[in-house]
Image: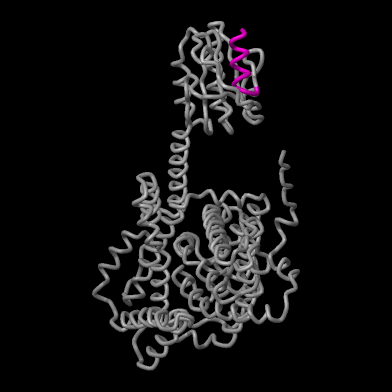
Amino acid sequence: MASRPADPTFTELFTPKLVTVLRERYGPADLRADAVAGLTVAIVALPLSMAIAIASGVTPDRGLYAAIVGGFIVSLMGGSRFQIGGPAGAFIVLVAATVGRHGVDGLILATLLSGLILVAIGLLRLGTFIKYIPYPVTVAFTAGIAVIIFASQLRELLGLDLEREPGPIVPKLAAIADALPTATPSAVAVALVTVGAIAATRRFRPHWPAMLIAVAVASVASWGLGLPVETIGSRFGGIPGSLPAPHLPALSTDKVLAVLPDALAFALLGGIESLLSAVVADSMSGRRHRSNCELVAQGTANVASALFGGICVTGTIARTATNVRAGARGPVAGMLHSAFLLLFMLAAAPLASYIPLAALAAVLAVVAWNMAEKHELLALLRSSRGDAVVVLATFLLVVLRDLTEGILVGFGLGALLFLHRMAQAVEVQVGDDRADAGDDRRPYDPDAAADPDVAVCRISGAFFFGAAANVGAVLDRLAEHPKAYVLDVSGVPDLDSTAATTIEGFVRKVERRGAAVYVAGARRPVRRVLLTHGVRPPRVRFKPTLAGALAAARAR
C-alpha cells in the first residue's frame, strides 16, 4: 500500500524564495544577471506606475511609492522567484471608485486593511482555493477591466475639457460624446505619436523599452514644439524627489467599517492577480511558487505601501514576464528594480513634470489592448453554451455594474455549470450485465443475474447533491417484489450528506416491505458518511465485493 506523503511544514510553506535562492550558492554572476533584469523592469515600470496612479484618480508619486516600497517587499518576502510587485491596471477601476467615495485617506486605509486580510488568508493557507476560480471568469473580468481602462483614458487621449467625468461607463461615454467639440488636436497628436512609437519600437527593436522611449519622444516633442497640452507639472506640480516618512492613516471605527467592502475587493483582486502572475512566471521558468507565502508577502507589501502613502500593490503579469525574459535569477532582480525606481525618482523627478498626460494615457490604452485576451475570449464564446454564458455574464457585469459583483456571479455560474456536468457524469445501472464480479474476478452465475428475488443497482461517479435527485428516482423505480437489494457503490469515490440521505430514504422504504439491503464495495470515506446518516447494520449489510453481496443475498 502506497504511503501518503507527509504534509509540508510551516517553514517549508512560508520560507521566502529569496532564502531558497541564496542557499543555492548565489554568486556574482547571478547578481549581475539580476541587476540587468532589475534595470530592464524598472525602465518598463517607471511610466506605467505613474500612468496607473493618474488613471486611478491620485497623484503620480503614489504609484511610484507603491512600486518602490511594495515591489521591494514582494520580492523580499514572496513565494515566487520572479514576481514583480507594483500598481496594476486591474486596480484602476476599484481604486478610482474608492477615491470617489472615501477620498485619498480612505483609499490608503482600505489598502492597509486589504494587506492585513491578505496576510490572514495566506497564514490560514487559503491561497490554494483561489485556483478554483474558473478560467472563463478570469478571462472575462480581465477583458472587462481592459474596456474600462480604455474608456477612462479617452478624456486625456482627446484632450477634452470635461469638468466632471462620471464613474459608470455608460454616463462616462455620454459625457465624453457631449465634450467632443472641446477636443485638443495637440493632445490627439501626442497620443498618436506615443502609440506609433510603441508599435515601431516593438516591431523593429523588440528588446528596447518601448513605453519609456515613446513617453520620452512625446515629452521632448511637446516641449520642443511648445504644444498646448497638459503635463504632470501643469496638473500636479511635478513629483517629489524623495520618499515620504511612513505614517499611519487616520483610524476610526466608522471609517474602517466604511472602507471594509473596498478592502475586501482589493484583497480578492490582489490575491487573484498575484497568483495568476506567479503561475505565468512558473510556466515560463519551470519553477513552482509557494502560493500562501506569496499572499503573505503581498499583504505585507500593501501594508508597507499604505504607510508610505502608496496605492494597492499586486503581482504584475507583464512586468513579471519581462523580468523572466530579461534573464533574472531570483528575487534580487525585483528588489533591484525597486532600488532603480527610487534612483530614478531621486535623480529625474524634475524631468517628470514635462511628461504629457496624453502620452501616459496612450501607454495605458496600449496596456488595455494587451490585457484583453481577445483570442481566448473568442475561443471561450465558441467552445460551449455554458462557457459563453459565464463569459458574457462576467464581462457585462464588470463593465456595466461592479468588478466584485462580476467575479462573484461568474464564479457562481461556473460552479453551477460544473455541478451540472458532474451530475450528468454519475451513472446508475439496474441489473447485472458484467462478465465478472468483485475483486476476485469470478464469473457471474447466469441464474443469479436473472434472479427475480435480488435486484442489483450499480452507482458510479461522484455521488453528490447534484445527482441525488436522478439516483433517487432510479431507486424509487426499482421493482417492489425482490426480497433483497444490492447497491454496488464500488465505483463511487465519494458522496455527500444529500447522497447519503437519499440512500437512507431508500433503505427506510425497503424496510417497510421486509426486504434486505446489501451495500457492496463501499470505500472507507463513503462508508463513514453512510454510517453517520443511519445507513448501518442491522438495517443494511456491508460487503467488500459485489460477488460477496450477491452470494449473501441469494443465501438469505
Quadrant hosting residue 81: bottom right
Quadrant hosting residue 360: bottom left
In the rendered image of this protein, does residue 435 appear above or below residue 117? above
- Segment colored magenta: 544-556
**What residue sits 75% from the left and 52% below the top?**
9
- Residue sitting nearer the eye, 456 or 273: 456
In the rendered image of this protein, does residue 2 appear above or below residue 144? above
Q: Quadrant of the N terminus?
A: top right
Relative image position of residue 428 (x, y in whole percent): 47, 26
Q: Main secondary structure of the magenta part?
A: helix
Disc tally is 0
Q: Quadrant of the C terminus?
A: top right
Q: Quick check: is 481 in the magenta stretch?
A: no
**What residue sits 38% from the left and 53% below the top?**
380
Relative image position of residue 344 (x, y in whole percent): 57, 84
- Residue sitting nearer the eye, 465 or 67: 465
Relative image position of residue 94 (x, y in whole percent): 47, 60
- Residue sitting nearer the eye, 389 or 483: 483
